[in-house]
Structure formats: structure tokens, C-alpha cells
Image (tube, rainbow, N blue to C red):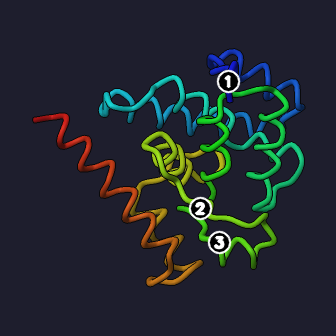
Amino acid sequence: MENSSIPTKNQCMYILKKYKTPNTVIQHCLTVTSIVEEFCLKIPQVNRKIAIAGAMLHDIGRTITHSISHAVNGVEILEKENIDSRIIAIVRNHIGTGIVKEEAKKLGLPPGDYIPETLEEEIVSYSDNLTSGNDRCSFEEKLDHFVQKFGKESHVVQGFFRQKKLLDSLIKLNKL
């Protein structure tokens, strides 16, 4: 999107409040943002402004629904607000560890893949997965939850391992 904006953290908070985002969702977004900020310190390749705005706004669609469709609703809201397309992609692709087009169809989402593609999308999705409500979780805690809910061989579990491996390798690379 040309002439679109990358909102600051305060501007994101204003947008969340403008759409009457429930306080529990705002607190969750702040928890995810805190995790994202930690990754930004360890992985300098991340576009910090994009990642933080994406973390702050990733669940704005929950003002409309708490179903999986919240990602699509969030995209619609942020398009109205003329938010940068890279942030909109974070909101669209943060659900689970990514959703392939066949699964999206079964879930009633508009056609297409909902897979994190950029580093910023991966970090927000992974950081979101490292929370339960407003609480941080360890990788192991969330892995146990995903295995119980989706099964050991599920694409969700595979995607969670993929995200961890990617971010761990970038952190390690930056320590060298």
C-alpha cells in the first residue's frame, strides 16, 4: 500500500481503543509485543517497527469475533485505517503456525494460504503461540498443548518446531 503508515506503539493502542478492543485482548497484545521486542533485541535483521506494530494489532479482529476469522476481520479493519501492508500480512498470517489453503477452506476462511512468510510474520506468530491469554508460556508448555489438541504429527506442531528452529538459528547466528 502506498502512502500507508506504520503506527507507533501508542498509535496502535489508539487504534485498538478506537475499535473498542476488550481489555483482555489489549493485555494479550501487550504480552505478545513484549516477547516480540525481546526477539528484536536478539535478531537485528527484524524490522522492529513492523514487528511491534504487527504484535500490537495482530488480534484487532477480536473486536468482531473470537473465531479463527478474527484474522480476516483484522485485515479489513487495518485496510480501512490505511495501515502498511506488511503489518496487514502479519495480522492475516499469525493464526496458529500457519494455515494452508485446504485447511482454510474447511475453516470457512476466504481462499488462500495463511502462512507466515516474512521474518516479522514468523516472530509475531511464534510470540503469539508463546502465550496463553495474557500469560507467557514456555515452548515446552505450548508444545504439550498443541500435541494434545492437534496430535504429534499435525502441521501445527510441525510449524511450531519450524518457527522455533528458524528463530533459534537467527539468534545463534547473531551471537557469532
Foreground tag (2 vs 1): 1
Give amino acid for label 2: Gly
Is the residue marked by circle 3 packed among few (<14), some (14-19), or many (20+) residues within 10 Å? Answer: some
Residue 93 at x, y percent in the picture: 61, 53
Foreground tag (2 vs 3): 3
Please state if 158 lies on the left or on the right of 51 as rendered: left
Give amino acid for label 1: Glu
Give amino acid for label 3: Lys
Q: Name the secondary structure under disc 3.
A: helix
Dot 1 or dot 3: first in sequence order is 1
Q: Which residue is mark 2?
A: 96
Q: Name the secondary structure under disc 2.
A: loop
Quarter of image, res 102: bottom right
Is the residue marked by circle 2 packed among few (<14), some (14-19), or many (20+) residues within 10 Å? Answer: many
- Label 2 – label 3 distance at C-alpha: 14 Å
Q: Which residue is mark 3?
A: 101
- Label 1 – label 3 distance at C-alpha: 28 Å
